[in-house]
Image: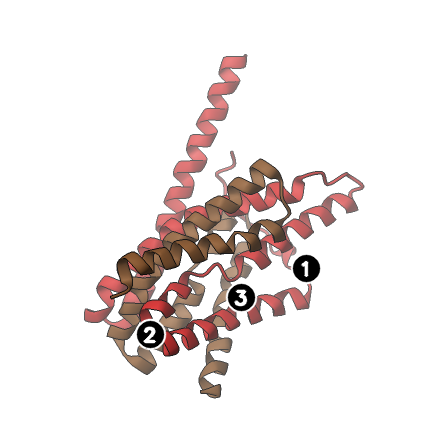
Chain colours: A red, B brown
Amino acid sequence: MNLKVKVNFSVLKETNWYEYATRFLIGGGITAFAGIVAKKFGPTVGGLFLAFPAIFPASATLIEKHEKEKKEKASVNPGFRGQIAVALDAAGATMGALGLIVFAALTWLLLPDHETWVVLLGSTIVWFIGSVAIWRIVAGSGRRRCVEERHRSA
Amino acid sequence: MVGEILIRVAVGGAMVSGFALLGDVIKPKRFAGLFGAAPSVALASLLLAVKTQGRIYAAIEARSMVAGAIAFFVYAYSVYWVSVRYRTTALVATLSHLAIWVVVAFGFWLVWLKG
């Protein structure tokens, strides 16, 4: 399993303007929706939607589409490549969601007595570091398993 | 009211797009997937909530967000599981499982938050 993180800006060219617009509108829409729900039913109901998987369906559909297009361009049968890419993305989101639980708990406990920007920035940093740590543990254990299996079969 | 909605759309849209772009350019895919659960909507909403309603109100929202985030975890894992096990398309897997998020989130609301 690959533990090296790379940045590839050429991927941005594969995405159309309407795909960016869709994400913007979905993200903005759910933020507005959460606000309206909080106004109508109170912050305890509205707060639930702060962790609504708003952008995940759009992103996963995009990933599947791009993976299929890449294989078709190379005249290769895409098979289940799109679904595998979506599964990997969902696995990452699962680890990110654990970080999101910590983000929410920290914000809940610290916001009443501390500066807003300090709490939100700090919680975001903890979300990122926590999610990456979980990812490294899971990816590392996967790599160890692969090496052990290779040793056994050799 | 309309003005506030437009501000929410603009701030939320910008936050979500920013985190989604990060997820696009980063590899490997499993790492990029972390950004699918970024606190983008939360940051936009909490900032606006503090500005308009105060910090206590925003903290109450954050407490409920703990339940929403647990529901997100269950949702993302179920999408992962169904994609691996049944090779369903992204659209079917991600949209049909939103019901799981609703059940888990409102389940927590019923037993923990509704007071």
Q: Nearer the viewer, residue A131 or A93?
A: A93
Q: Which residue is mark 2?
A: A42
The first of marks 2 and 1 along the sequence is 1
Q: Tag 3: Cα neighbours inside 10 Å, few (<14), some, or many (≥20)?
A: many
Q: Nearer the viewer, residue A29 or A110?
A: A29
* Mark 2 vs mark 1, CA separation in Å: 42 Å
Picture layout, residue B53 above or below residue A13: below
Which mark is on residue B50? none
Picture layout, residue B82 above or below residue B94: above
Q: x%, y% of residue A15?
A: 67, 60
* Mark 3 vs mark 2, CA separation in Å: 27 Å
Location of the C terminus of chain A (image quadrant): top right
Q: Is residue B54 left or right of residue A74?
A: left
Quadrant of residue B59 within the rendered picture: bottom left
Disc 3 is placed on an element classified as helix
- Badge 3 amino acid: Ser
Q: Which residue is mark 1?
A: A13
Q: Is residue A154 left or right of residue A109?
A: right
Numbered disc in front, either 1 or 3: 3
* Mark 1 vs mark 3, CA separation in Å: 15 Å
Q: Tag 2: Cα neighbours inside 10 Å, few (<14), some, or many (≥20)?
A: some
Q: Is residue A79 left or right of residue B54?
A: right
- Badge 2 amino acid: Gly
Q: Is residue B30 left or right of residue A100?
A: right
Answer yes or no: are tags 3 and 2 on the same subunit.
no
Q: x%, y% of residue A89?
A: 54, 47
Numbered disc in front, either 2 or 1: 2
Q: Nearer the viewer, residue A2 or B96?
A: B96
Residue B30 visible (yes or no): no
Looking at this rendering, what residue extends furthest in the left direction? A113
Q: Which residue is mark 3?
A: B17
